[in-house]
Amino acid sequence: MKNKLLLTSALIMTCGATNADTSQIKLGEFSKGSLTGWESKVFKGKTQYQIKQQGNIKSLSAVSNAGASGLGVRKRIDLTKTPFLNWSWRVDKPLPPLKEKTKAGDDYAARLYVIIDGGLFIWKTKALNYVWSSTPSKGTKWNNAFAPRNARMLSVRDSRNGPGQWLKEKQNVQQDFKNLYGFIPRYIDGVALMTDTDNSGGSAAASYGDIFFSAK
């Protein structure tokens, strides 16, 4: 299928901006039962996204069966002020080990990514993917099989992190762009998430907690 990562830049182009810049910029307040500002984009089939009460908190549930759709929010983030992307997530139903560097294996039970939007100049679009890998590969980085120049992957969690574990993440987006692309951006234009299984034809489920940028 066509590259899901670049198509998502069109998704964030349609979304409304959120709150003004502060030392903490909230993008996903799922714990409050809110999907304000988030819009969907269907690529093949449809992942089911729903705010659910899970234990003591509300979170965003994602279930995918041989399909792929994402949610994205458009917001220009000044990384010189708030470079850290923070989120929590949990894999509820993992994928079997996939060859994730290939087109057939470009599926993830959970992924969160940031986008520099190239607008009409699609070749200037850059996506940085933080993924929960189906293989033991935490810390590994690679070029996406569909768009090696425009989409880079970083395994933040992997198959050694079993299902049902809530894990908190904090990534320095500027530093990650430097490590994966070789340059330090000042701005990113949006954030998207996706649980997708269309290329492998499998099924997966995950949950996403609140998402925000912070100064430290």
Image (cartoon, rainbow, N blue to C red):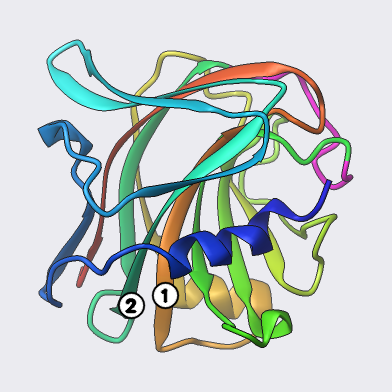
Q: Is residue 95 magenta?
A: yes
First to last magenta residue range: 94-103
Front position in the image: 12 or 20: 12
- Please state if 94 lies on the left or on the right of 22 as rendered: right
Disc 1 residue type (three-letter): Asp
Please identify the quadrant where the N terminus is shown.
Answer: top right
- Please state if 159 lies on the left or on the right of 215 as rendered: right
Q: Counting other residues with Cα less than 10 Å from the Cα at mark 2, is it few (<14), some (14-19), or many (20 or more)?
A: some
Disc 2 residue type (three-letter): Arg
Residue beneath label 1, please? 189
Residue at image coords 45%, 64%? 12
Image coordinates for residue 137, horizontal then vertical, percent: 70, 40
Asked if 37 appears above or below 104 in the picture, the reply is below
Q: Is residue 177 magenta?
A: no
Residue at image coords 49%, 14%? 163
Which label sits on residue 128?
none
Residue at image coords 52%, 24%? 161
- Please tell me in which quadrant of the rendered image residue 97 appears: top right
Which label sits on residue 76?
2
Please identify the quadrant where the C terminus is shown.
Answer: bottom left
Q: Counting other residues with Cα less than 10 Å from the Cα at mark 1, is it few (<14), some (14-19), or many (20 or more)?
A: some
> Could you tell me which secondary element the residue under label 1 belongs to?
strand
